[in-house]
Image (cartoon, rainbow, N blue to C red):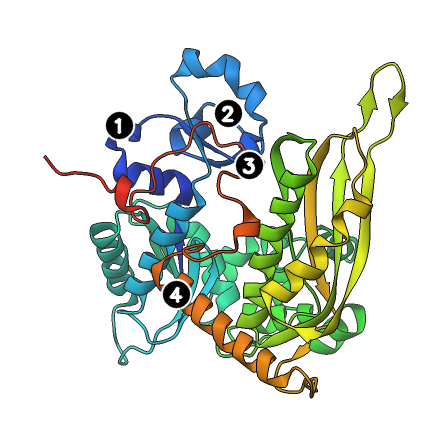
């Protein structure tokens, strides 16, 4: 059996763990640069506020309804997510995180076990140890567990176990709400007269494979109670790795742009090394705003391609090479909104042919960054970083309503009085 454990209103719940004044109040968590609503408390949902509503549209309602605004505190959310996953490890040796706020568990309980009671144990322990409320759905496959989770989160108990025969439930479920069935597939299924999930489950395998792809065929298998995906399946290495962010305000200084690119290069290089890959080069770009002054100017992107002397995962080598080309793509007088780095030509570090004249130095650099990555993993991101990434970083995203980093910053740990 599979269990899908999904945190309720996760970002809001994380904020409420350390700020009890937020409980029973309408709370909105904003996206990068305080742009739009990405997490809502149940109280905010009751006011009719939809997901994605821009912050400026919320402003007139804040005083009227007592809405509390918070900026996205990804450091806090990431840390609490890891804590939830750690607790889930007590209930199953096979935990597969699906996103920051949900994970699948493979449950192997003795025959005759009470799965409903087990789901309640999971909820109670996470709430007690982490402070996050969750919903639990249990079923023979991950697709059915996903459906069971939606039902469980709306129930008083917060847990739902899919019955042996799910026909009555699937008959009421629109096919478009089945995990993995997007809008395009929904439209095609509807044209074929397949409206409900139960109708999809009843289709002949040969018909499904002829009309659709193997992914839909696997979904049908899962709806029929046959697991079609393995939890320990190995992901294919990335074909490209990128990192980009929008700035908190328009940037006009090349120095700030250079710092931002250095941060994004370092972040992407860490992921590159984590996958044991090296890159042959990088595409670097700046995106600038349109102008509507006396002389109108269109917005656009300016960029270039950098080829490294040899495939590398060495952040210093990348930064030195990339820094030389940035002045050439900088347009004086433009206001920049975003920058990004995309590594290309990726290959396994184990198969890269080393440069015979720089092999010893390259090997030492690999050991250096192995140590850097280990330190940053143990003590927190950016514990060690290149000076090129800057100290103050005034160009970073705007987070005017940011809560403290209760669990990841020694200076912000709450004090019990």
Which of pointers 2 and 3 indicates the residue nearer the eye?
A: 3
Distance in Å between CA atoms under marks 1 and 2: 22 Å
Q: Horizontal and vertical percent for residue 225?
A: 51, 73
Q: Is residue 363 left or right of residue 301?
A: left
Q: Horizontal and vertical percent for residue 166?
A: 48, 63
Distance in Å between CA atoms under marks 4 and 2: 45 Å
Q: Quadrant of residue 67?
A: top left
Which of pointers 4 and 3 indicates the residue nearer the eye?
A: 4
Q: Which residue is mark 3?
A: 397
Asked if labels 1 and 3 touch by Cβ distance under 8 angstroms, the answer is no
Label 4 vs 2, first from the N-terminus: 2
Distance in Å between CA atoms under marks 1 and 4: 36 Å
Distance in Å between CA atoms under marks 4 and 3: 25 Å
Which of pointers 3 and 1 indicates the residue nearer the eye?
A: 3
Which of pointers 4 and 2 indicates the residue nearer the eye?
A: 4
| Residue nearest the viewer, comparing 101 with 187 | 101
**Eyeballing the image, is 302 above or below 106?**
above
Secondary element at tag 4: helix
Q: Which residue is mark 1?
A: 21
């Amino acid at each position: 059996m599979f269990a899908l454990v999904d945190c309720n209103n996760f970002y809001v719940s994380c904020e409420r763990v350390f700020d009890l004044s937020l409980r029973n109040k309408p709370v909105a968590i904003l996206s990068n640069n305080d742009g739009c609503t990405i997490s809502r408390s149940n109280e905010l949902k009751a006011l009719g506020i939809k997901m994605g509503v821009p912050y400026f549209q919320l402003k007139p309602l804040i005083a009227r309804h007592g809405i509390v605004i918070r900026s996205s505190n990804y450091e806090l959310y990431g840390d609490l997510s890891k804590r939830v996953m750690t607790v889930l490890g007590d209930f199953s040796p096979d935990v597969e995180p699906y996103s920051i706020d949900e994970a699948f568990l493979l449950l192997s309980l003795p025959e005759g076990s009470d799965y409903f009671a087990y789901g309640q144990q999971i909820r109670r322990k996470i709430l007690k140890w982490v402070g996050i409320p969750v919903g639990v759905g249990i079923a023979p496959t991950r697709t059915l567990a996903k459906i069971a989770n939606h039902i469980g989160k709306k129930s008083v108990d917060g847990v739902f176990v899919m019955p042996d025969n799910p026909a009555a439930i699937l008959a009421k479920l629109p096919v478009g709400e089945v995990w993995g069935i997007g809008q395009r597939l929904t439209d095609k299924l509807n044209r074929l007269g397949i409206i409900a999930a139960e109708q999809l489950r009843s289709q002949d395998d040969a018909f499904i494979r002829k009309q659709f792809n193997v992914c839909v065929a696997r979904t049908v298998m899962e709806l029929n109670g046959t697991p079609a995906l393995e939890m320990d399946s190995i992901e294919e290495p990335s074909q490209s790795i990128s990192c980009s962010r929008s700035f908190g305000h328009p940037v006009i200084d090349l120095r700030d742009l250079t710092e931002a690119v250095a941060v994004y290069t370092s972040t992407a290089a860490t992921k590159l090394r984590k996958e044991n890959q090296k890159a042959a080069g990088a595409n670097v770009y700046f995106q600038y705003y349109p102008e509507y002054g006396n002389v109108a100017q269109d917005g656009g992107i300016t960029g270039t391609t950098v080829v490294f002397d040899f495939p590398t995962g060495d952040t210093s080598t990348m930064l030195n090479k990339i820094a030389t080309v940035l002045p050439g793509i900088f347009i004086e007088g433009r206001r920049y909104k975003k920058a990004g780095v995309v590594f290309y030509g990726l290959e396994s570090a184990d198969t890269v042919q080393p440069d015979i004249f720089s092999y010893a130095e390259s090997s030492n650099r690999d050991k250096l960054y192995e140590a850097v990555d280990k330190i940053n993993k143990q003590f927190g991101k950016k514990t060690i970083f290149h000076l090129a990434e800057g100290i103050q970083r005034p160009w970073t995203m705007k987070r005017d309503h940011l809560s403290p980093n209760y669990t990841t910053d020694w200076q912000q740990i709450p004090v019990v009085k």
